């Protein structure tokens, strides 16, 4: 039975788009993933290393259950999933309809290179005469006009950059497969009407355009133009605005009435620009400003021609749309550019630095100065370039630059000379994420990276030495000048280009900086139902936050699809029943691609075929001219249809690209795709380019032989599966737990919610308002009421988990309720841990000795109970990081700084004369809360930084007078003493996750007592043990809205499992040959996924087929070869070793 | 000895080094023809007996290469491989194989250049070391 599925559209193929698409695809929906770029991966295709591991690991995002539905190779190489349809170079141009049944209009940019025909040989680029800056290397190297957008990506089809291409046609001639079309031929039929009252203008335009092959008519007035249009058809009109008689705008209006499809470009002088903009609302496509450069004009006409003639529009039905459009990096060459970016070659952006040290970068990974190629010995990072800057209209924090600067500094230390000196100039190091503070500390202590506080305003060049000079205030406010070899600008995130248009098309709002605006407490929801945001589209985010946000958006999309009745209803239609070959002797049929005529001369395919035939296991060998073409593939299908064999080996290029097609082929010929392989015979020709043909031929043959031996050893096993109890358990009834429970229940699956306290709500019970002024209690009540009424939700308050055991699909949890100790055992498929946390105890700064010393939570409560009268106070002091961000609680609690800002603004509103001093280490007002920081300073609050070794000192006088706070003021270089009516301590957050609870589900807690996620970036809400998830503060400190995002993300991860009645076993999975097993249990210890256990009754080691990822560590650990991985049996491996050595 | 072209068997992990090798190929990084790749899911899957088998069959050197520490797709398989290779290097001389013939490296997916460089370096090292004579002498 094939399920009938709903379809979602995901816009943007960066990290969040990939996550959202995969989440939805794994849940069972169909996904159309579009990206306007010619590749997926977004900026991550350019980044090799990510903090805090300083490695990649993006592949860890790939499906873990039902793995075979997706690709099993490096995700930066490409993505394939049977439920995801990827459309590149495609934009969304319209969304009609409503949630559940949108009709989305897509427009694919002109395809000059036919991806079906392109074999990635590169002959086109070799003859292309154009050189332009290569975006992939952030402009540090050059590429051709026909190029590979991401050189390491599959499929490696070339694309043409229409803006750079001169249409010389060299590539068309060079292409061996005839894949390139330049659409020059059709220009004669593309009628252009030029309307201008000045004869010289219209005549010279005509001349330019005729030269480029267009057919052109001219008209001297509006009336004449309208007459001409009646007589003959035009596709495009260039229309002057200011004309005597009927003006351009009127002509436009009349034209639109009769010819609404006409592409009209207005021509205007500066004075009438506003009119031109107005005209665009009436239906003009664009405008050109006079006087114009002939090249601009001609290329505009060519653009329009190509969009009209060569781009393809299409309508796609989708139940929900998720926008994961990402952001753009700030360009420091705009504005005042006091850092000399683009002026001095050694001043680079963070992204350029990443490309410079990348193995695929312009210099092959050598850290050298772009100006002279000498090694970099001294390097500086300047933070907050294009962020936290009112001058660039960026009164927000980009949130990730501090961390990437630290990462880059560490990488520089690793790649550069041993004595490399790395300095980071910063205002606040915003290490607010999980483990970030320790990462920073390690950078400082273990990697000797220098952190210098201060905003650098200028970088200049010392002409004599060629070094870059930075001046900054040192200690005692003395100016220090220092020379550097290289300066990296930590550029921030900006809204992606075209946001206005997209917001109009999709009907969502933008915030004041142009990012997408989400609804209060619903980080992924837009004002339009069925349309959602994921990732940095709605505000700057790092990878982990983007992944969480994408999970939240896909959950919302899934709810929308489900409630529109586009769930998982089953329809008839059988899944393929593959022919059972298990008792047949292996017979391999080999089909070889001749790769057109592009193989080096002297290679004799017939000889290879004849040689292979001597192997008794080979049934027959065929050759096909070119498998990658449609005709070639049809020929292959034909060859595969004829019976007489039970294994198929295809010798071709790009084995990566064939995964999907082999699956289709398998369904056609009813052969398990496990029994088919593509062996790369094209690579030897590339790799051994200098070798003789006979050598390459030998290498090709050797590859094929190893393919044959691999196939010979394949033994497809009957598909086993793990049944799923389609119920969820959520532990913890705070906002995260409630949100997660509701999200799952909204899909129609039963959820049990367990809460320790007698009532639900957790921290929201005492939190009154957010910094934005949203009412927390009203929000909590609405969620609680929905939950309590939900037919699929069972709530156990005053209850706790007594014990639990089990694995994904089948957990058993015993719950104890109340004092009467009623006990109940539940059988459920997934567990979500949302045990939250609370304010850390204040055991410093004399808290408890005086009523005037309170914590932030106490302040919040006293303010809402009106126990504090701010109007009668003179001075308030707030101390940040009281006990936070130093051992043993060496992490940032994220919410305290925003909370401080909230209280400042509130107090200042009540009493404008109140003096407020904030003693802080780094203000963590990341994202848009930076605005509140600016507001608080404007309101007059004084911020005084302190360091851990010079903490403020609080003294409580015995006479009942005011509390005294003494602190070091670095600008004055002196101690200041403040008498405060009120001292507020920001003590941070501690988790309340019992280690035993995590352990009961096979999960772990980290050093600080928070839930240990499987992977901080790629799997931020999962446990390493499948089926266990966490959200909210149990995961790490976070705000209400951020908790909601994690809860939705966790629910989405759970949905992947709950939507299936059973989880099936993947092709490459380990198992145990019980007769050889001595029960030593070493394989159980070594399994990273906890997929193995011992069944004491049966005296057997059991492998959970859904949890096993097929890494084979158990197989090499096993002393008896009892543990084996399908497809990698010892026999087969040894056979292959034999085969490749000859 | 002038003509000696060593045979190198490389066990490469599916996620990192195999991708790097492929990248070296597709980005036309030319490297010596001496290497034969065997793709495994994880370096932690490489049983020491595969390596001994390769030497016995006549390989002049064996390369085991996977993801960087901390980057293993399977969390920690590369650490396990590192442990095993260390032990194997200790016992290889007992079989008569120079431990220099076994090499363990970490080559990430985007390090095509690094892969080509590793192979080049290894070929010149092994050329200096000479052919694996022990394959004839070893008694198993």
Image: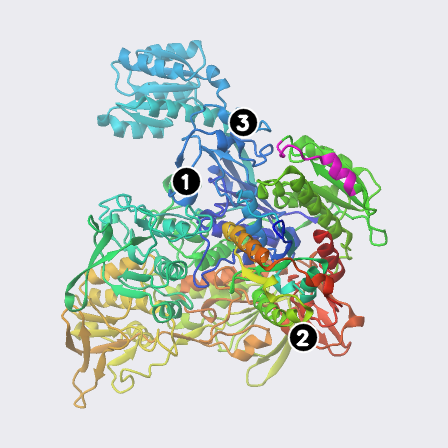
Q: Residue at x 30, y 11 (%)?
A: A220
Mark 1 burial class by Cα count in 10 Å: few <14, some 14-19, many 20+: some
Secondary structure beneath label 2: helix
| Subunit that carries the residue with mark 1 | A
Task: Residue at the far front: name it.
Answer: B1
Mark 2 burial class by Cα count in 10 Å: few <14, some 14-19, many 20+: few
Mark 2 or mark 1, which has the lower sequence index?
Answer: 1
Q: Which residues are magenta?
A: A598-612
Residue A565, percent from left and from top: 60, 49
Residue wearing tag 1:
A134
Vertical order, A383 against A588 (above or below): below
Q: Contact (CB < 8 A) between labels 3 and 2?
A: no
Residue at mark 3 to residue at mark 2: CA–CA distance = 59 Å
In-image side of A841 versus A612 (left or right)? left
Residue at mark 2 to residue at mark 1: CA–CA distance = 51 Å
Label annotation for residue A971: none
Residue at mark 1 to residue at mark 3: CA–CA distance = 22 Å
In-image side of A555 versus A764 (left or right)? right
Secondary structure beneath label 3: helix
Compare residues A393 and B76 and report the one nearer the observer: B76
Residue wearing tag 2:
A1082
| Subunit that carries the residue with mark 2 | A
Residue A383, percent from left and from top: 29, 57
Residue wearing tag 3:
A174
Vertical order, A1074 against A647 (above or below): below
> For residue A606: magenta?
yes
Q: Residue at x 24, y 24 (%)?
A: A269
Labels 2 and 1 within one chain: yes
Residue B66, percent from left and from top: 57, 59
Secondary structure beneath label 1: loop
| Subunit that carries the residue with mark 3 | A
């Amino acid at each position: 039975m094939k399920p009938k599925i709903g379809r979602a559209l995901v816009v943007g193929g960066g990290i969040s788009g990939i996550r959202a698409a995969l989440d939805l695809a794994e849940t069972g929906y169909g996904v159309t993933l579009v990206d306007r770029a010619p590749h997926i991966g977004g900026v991550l295709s350019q980044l090799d290393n990510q903090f805090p591991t300083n490695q990649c690991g993006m592949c860890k995002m790939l499906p873990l259950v039902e793995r075979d539905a997706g690709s099993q190779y490096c995700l930066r190489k490409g993505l394939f999933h049977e439920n995801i349809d990827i459309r590149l170079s495609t934009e969304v141009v319209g969304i009609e309809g409503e949630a559940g049944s949108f009709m989305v209009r897509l427009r694919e940019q002109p395809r000059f290179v036919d991806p079906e025909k392109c074999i990635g040989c590169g002959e086109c680029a070799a003859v292309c005469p154009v050189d332009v800056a290569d975006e992939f290397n952030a402009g540090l190297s050059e590429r051709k006009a026909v190029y590979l957008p991401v050189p390491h990506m599959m499929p490696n089809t070339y694309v043409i950059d229409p803006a750079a291409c001169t249409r010389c046609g060299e590539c068309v001639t060079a292409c061996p497969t005839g894949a390139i079309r330049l659409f020059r031929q059709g220009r004669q039929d593309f009628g252009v009407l030029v309307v201008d009252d000045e004869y010289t203008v219209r005549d010279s335009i005509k001349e330019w355009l005729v030269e480029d092959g267009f057919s052109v008519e001219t008209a001297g007035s509006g009336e004449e133009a309208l007459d001409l249009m009646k007589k003959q058809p035009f596709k495009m009109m260039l229309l002057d605005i200011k004309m005597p008689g009927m003006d351009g705008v009127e002509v436009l209006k009349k034209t639109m009435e009769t010819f609404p499809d006409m592409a009209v470009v207005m021509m205007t002088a500066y004075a009438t620009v506003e009119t031109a903009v107005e005209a665009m609302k009436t239906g003009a496509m664009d405008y050109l400003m006079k006087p114009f450069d002939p090249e601009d004009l001609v290329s505009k006409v060519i653009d329009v021609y190509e969009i009209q003639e060569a781009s393809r529009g299409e309508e796609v039905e989708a139940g929900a749309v998720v926008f994961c459009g990402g952001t753009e990096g700030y360009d420091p060459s705009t504005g005042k550019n006091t850092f000399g970016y683009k002026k001095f070659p050694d001043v680079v952006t963070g992204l350029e630095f990443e490309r410079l040290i990348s193995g695929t970068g312009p210099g092959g990974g050598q850290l050298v100065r772009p100006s002279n190629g000498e090694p970099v010995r001294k390097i500086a990072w300047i933070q907050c370039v294009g962020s936290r800057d009112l001058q660039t209209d960026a009164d927000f924090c980009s949130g990730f630059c501090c961390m990437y600067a630290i990462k880059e500094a560490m990488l520089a230390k690793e790649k550069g000379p041993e004595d490399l000196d790395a300095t980071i100039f910063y205002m606040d190091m915003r290490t607010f994420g999980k483990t970030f503070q320790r990462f920073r500390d390690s950078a400082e202590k273990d990697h000797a990276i220098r952190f210098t506080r201060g905003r650098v305003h200028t970088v200049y060049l010392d002409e004599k030495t060629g070094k870059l000079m930075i001046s900054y205030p040192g200690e005692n406010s003395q100016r220090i000048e220092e020379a550097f070899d290289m300066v990296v600008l930590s550029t921030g995130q900006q809204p992606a280009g075209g946001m206005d248009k997209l917001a109009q098309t999709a009907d969502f709002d933008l915030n004041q900086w142009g990012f997408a605006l989400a609804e209060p407490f619903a980080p992924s929801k837009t004002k339009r139902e069925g349309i959602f945001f994921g990732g940095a589209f709605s505000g700057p985010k790092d990878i982990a936050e983007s992944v969480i946000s994408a999970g939240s958006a896909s959950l919302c999309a899934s709810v929308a699809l489900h409630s529109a009745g586009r769930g998982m209803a089953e329809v008839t239609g059988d899944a393929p029943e593959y022919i059972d070959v298990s008792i047949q002797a292996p017979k391999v049929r080999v089909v070889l691609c001749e790769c057109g005529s592009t193989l080096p001369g002297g290679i004799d395919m017939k000889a290879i075929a004849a040689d292979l035939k001597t192997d008794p296991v080979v049934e027959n060998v065929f050759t096909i001219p070119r498998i990658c073409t449609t005709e070639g593939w049809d020929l292959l299908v034909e060859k595969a249809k004829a019976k007489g064999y039970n294994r198929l080996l295809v010798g071709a290029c790009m084995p990566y690209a064939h995964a999907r097609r082999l699956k289709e082929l398998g369904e056609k010929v009813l052969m398990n795709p496990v029994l088919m392989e593509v062996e790369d015979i094209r690579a030897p020709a590339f790799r051994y380019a200098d070798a003789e043909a006979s050598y390459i031929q030998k290498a090709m043959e050797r590859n094929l032989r190893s393919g044959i031996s691999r196939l010979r050893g394949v033994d497809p096993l009957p598909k086993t599966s793990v049944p799923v109890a389609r119920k969820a358990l959520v532990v913890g009834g705070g906002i995260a737990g409630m949100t997660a429970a509701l999200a799952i229940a909204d899909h129609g699956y039963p959820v049990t919610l367990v809460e320790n306290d007698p009532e639900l709500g957790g921290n929201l019970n005492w939190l009154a308002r957010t910094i934005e002024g949203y009412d927390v209690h009203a929000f909590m009540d609405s969620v609680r009421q929905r939950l309590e009424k939900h037919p699929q939700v069972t709530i156990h308050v005053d209850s706790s988990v007594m014990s639990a055991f089990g694995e994904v699909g089948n957990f058993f949890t015993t719950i104890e309720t109340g004092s009467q100790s009623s006990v109940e055992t539940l059988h459920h498929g997934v567990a979500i841990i949302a045990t939250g946390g609370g304010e850390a105890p204040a055991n410093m700064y004399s808290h408890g000795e005086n009523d005037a010393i309170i914590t932030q939570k106490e302040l919040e409560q006293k303010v809402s109970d009106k126990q504090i009268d701010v109007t009668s106070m003179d001075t308030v002091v707030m101390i940040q990081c009281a006990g936070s961000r130093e051992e043993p609680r060496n992490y940032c609690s994220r919410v305290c700084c925003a909370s401080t800002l909230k209280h400042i603004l509130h107090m200042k509103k009540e009493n404008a004369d109140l003096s407020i001093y904030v003693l802080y280490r780094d203000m963590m007002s990341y994202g848009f809360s930076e605005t509140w920081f600016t507001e608080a300073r404007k309101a007059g609050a004084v911020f005084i930084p302190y360091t851990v070794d010079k903490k403020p000192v609080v003294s409580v006088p015995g006479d009942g007078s005011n509390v005294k706070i003494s602190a070091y003021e670095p600008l004055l270089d002196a101690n200041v003493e403040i008498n405060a009516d009120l001292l507020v301590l920001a003590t941070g957050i501690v988790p309340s996750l019992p280690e035993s609870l995590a352990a009961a589900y096979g999960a772990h807690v980290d050093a600080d007592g928070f839930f240990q996620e499987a992977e901080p970036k790629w799997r931020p809400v999962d446990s390493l043990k499948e089926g266990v998830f966490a959200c909210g503060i149990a995961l790490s400190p976070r705000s209400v809205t951020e908790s909601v995002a994690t809860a939705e993300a966790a629910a989405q991860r759970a949905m992947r499992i709950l939507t299936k009645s059973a989880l099936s076993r993947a092709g490459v999975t380990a198992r145990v040959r019980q007769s050889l097993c001595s029960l030593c249990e070493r394989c159980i210890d070594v399994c990273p996924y906890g997929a193995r256990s011992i069944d004491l009754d049966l005296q057997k080691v059991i492998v959970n087929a859904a949890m096993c990822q097929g890494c084979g560590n158990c197989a090499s650990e096993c002393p008896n070869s009892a543990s084996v991985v399908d497809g990698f049996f010892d026999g087969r491996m040894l056979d292959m070793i034999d085969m490749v050595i000859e | 000895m002038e003509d000696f072209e060593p045979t190198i068997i490389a066990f490469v992990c599916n996620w990192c080094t195999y991708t790097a090798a492929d990248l070296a190929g597709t980005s036309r990084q030319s490297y010596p023809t001496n290497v034969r790749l065997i793709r495994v899911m994880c370096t932690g899957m490489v049983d020491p007996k595969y390596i001994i088998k390769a030497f016995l069959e006549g390989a002049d050197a064996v390369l085991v290469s996977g993801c960087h520490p901390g980057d293993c797709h399977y969390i920690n398989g590369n650490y396990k491989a590192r442990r095993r290779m260390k032990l194997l290097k200790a016992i290889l001389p007992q079989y008569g194989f120079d431990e220099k013939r076994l090499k363990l490296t970490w080559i990430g997916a985007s390090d095509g250049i690094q892969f080509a460089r590793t192979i080049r370096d290894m070929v010149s090292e092994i050329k200096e070391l000479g052919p694996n004579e022990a394959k004839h002498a070893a008694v198993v």
